[in-house]
Amino acid sequence: MSTARHEEFDVAVVGGGPAGSTLATLVAMRGHRVLLLEKETFPRYQIGESLLPSTVHGICHLLGVDGELADAGFPRKRGGTFRWGANPAPWNFAFSVSSKVAGPTSFAYQVERSKFDNILLENASRKGVDVRQNRTVTDVVAGEDGRVRGVRYTDADGTGHEVSARYVVDASGNTGRIHHRVGGERKYSDFFRSLALFGYFENGKRLPAPNSGNILSVAFKHGWFWYIPLSDTLTSVGAVVRREDAAKVQGDPETALRALIAECPLISEYLTGATRVTTGQYGQLRVRKDYSYHHTKFWRPGMALVGDAACFVDPVFSSGVHLATYSALLAARSINSVLAGTVGEQRAFDEFEARYRREYGVFYEFLTSFYDMHIDEDSYFWSAKKVTRSSRPELESFVELIAGISSTEFDLSDTESGALRLKQRSAEFADAVDTLVEAREENMTPLFRSSVVRQAMQEGSQVQTRAQLGDAAGEDTPVLDGGLVASSDGMSWREPDPGR
Ligand code: FAD
């Protein structure tokens, strides 16, 4: 191993996806020395194309790329259109309470991830991050005191390097290999145990305006489909099925995808006359399985996990990039505060972990409700997705996930109260969707009143408001009992004002 020139950084980031580039940029913007090591050469392919507004108007605004995103020509997403639940009619979930009077920030984008991720990574470089592509991190370096103090990596010609850093942030996604070095373990979810088979089509049909940029999600007997418009003509199409069907798709994915499409009338109709892309980055059919999990620890002294390296929960509500960039913001606040000497490490990272777990828990509950509301008693896929049939280890895992989060919203003592809570939330959400569908109008109030939706939108809109308004957003309130608040620019933590 070559150690000719030993380098030192404040932070070494592993992975240049949305989580890694967001964290690296937000720390470099505070004047710290940041190294980002990325295994591949960008632009590179990635799945996860449907974004949420808080990423676009909150985090991307803080990063200073919202203008560049607006110029990139990505389709605007006003929300989601779902053929899902008891009612056969498709219904809309708009990001604004009334879809007739949409606010200036109540939309997101559908993005080609190769382009979106490249915009974020190039921006990191411009903001002072030392970005090195084609470098694979092989391990972390830990001191005898147990503190992580750097990383080892190999470059394109196989030469090994070691660098020191006060913090190492693992943002290497679901395929990374160093997450276990934080301690604890990665726990896979039984409830969300699925498999996705996906590809790309040219000239598929579009939803009628003004919802033509929406993601279309369609439930069918064996699972559900996503249908995401990436340009006027290009569409990302994926089927999510039960994991037990793996053999079926591994044989010949083309035949399997065609057969699944044929079983879903709405997707078949939308793809009438469309052709599958067979060349370039979109030319192959891909499979992802067992993709919902969380790590039991998110940090240790000198190291933190963000994005898919820490956790991921099912793609049905497009929360992956939100959780990746939100966790990066939280970790950047903690690192910026500790490096500035304004908050102690334990307190700063406990805040990071608790807020991150809370947000993951909020989406976990919301997505559980989403699956629970779809009624198809004859389908193995859908009956396995009933909350009432959730296995005990899964509920224990949920309770463990959010245990210790000192917040009145998550007041769970045991598995029974966890199960009860999930069932109540699901029933309330199903009622809200029924009300929406029956009213046949595009007023989202019933949805936004339901606990799971209110919670799922709450923290994202906080981030958005602070990023857009800064000081004018007023004093932040702690999310957690006795917790910290964001600084007025949203880039670090501080103690709340006494007396509030
Ligand atoms: P990644 O985007 O995976 O980036 C990690 C980076 O780390 C990669 O560039 C990788 O090359 C690099 N890396 C890995 N190992 C190393 C190493 N050893 N050294 C250096 N670099 C390394 N999310 C949404 O928001 N919307 C969606 O519609 C959506 N759909 C999805 C559909 C499916 C089927 C699945 C499985 C996921 C979906 N997601 C979606 C989730 C989304 O893909 C992820 O949550 C998101 O990409 C996470 O970003 P990240 O930065 O954590 O990781």
Image (cartoon, grey):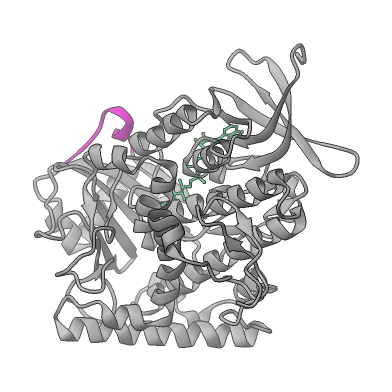
Residue 294 horizontal/vertical position (percent): 60, 59
Q: Is residue 145 visible?
A: yes
- Residue 366 location, quadrant: bottom left
**Percent x, y of residue 409:** 56, 80
Front-most of 12 and 481?
481
Residue drawn at the location 64% of the way across and 78% of the way down? 499
Q: Which residue corresponds to the image point at 36% horizontal and 74% vertical from the top-left?
A: 379
Was residue 280 drawn as part of the magenta stretch in this picture? yes
- The structure residue drawn at horizontal position 58% and vertical position 42%, both measured from the top left corner, is 171
Q: Residue furthest right?
A: 144
The residue closer to the viewer here, 243 or 428, is 428
Q: Nearer the viewer, residue 228 or 17?
A: 17
Q: Position of 123 compared to 25: left or right?
A: left
Residue 257 image position (x, y, % from top left): 29, 49
Q: Is residue 216 magenta?
A: no
Among the 4 quarters of the image, the one containing residue 118: top left
Q: Along the horizontal axis of the image, is 185 left or right of 16?
A: right
Based on the displayed image, in which of its 4 quarters is residue 420 positioned?
Answer: bottom right
Q: Quadrant of the N terminus?
A: top right
Residue drawn at (28%, 48%) of the image: 110
| Image spot of residue 139 (x, y percent) | 72, 33
Give left or right: position of 480 versus 162: left
Please state, as top left, top right, bottom left or bottom right, where the C terminus lies in the image.
bottom right
Residue 369 appears in the rendering: no
Between 441 and 107, the one lying in front of the other is 107
Figure check: 486 above or below 120? below
Lateral position of residue 98 relative to residue 199, left or right: left
Question: Magenta segment, which residues?
Answer: 275-284
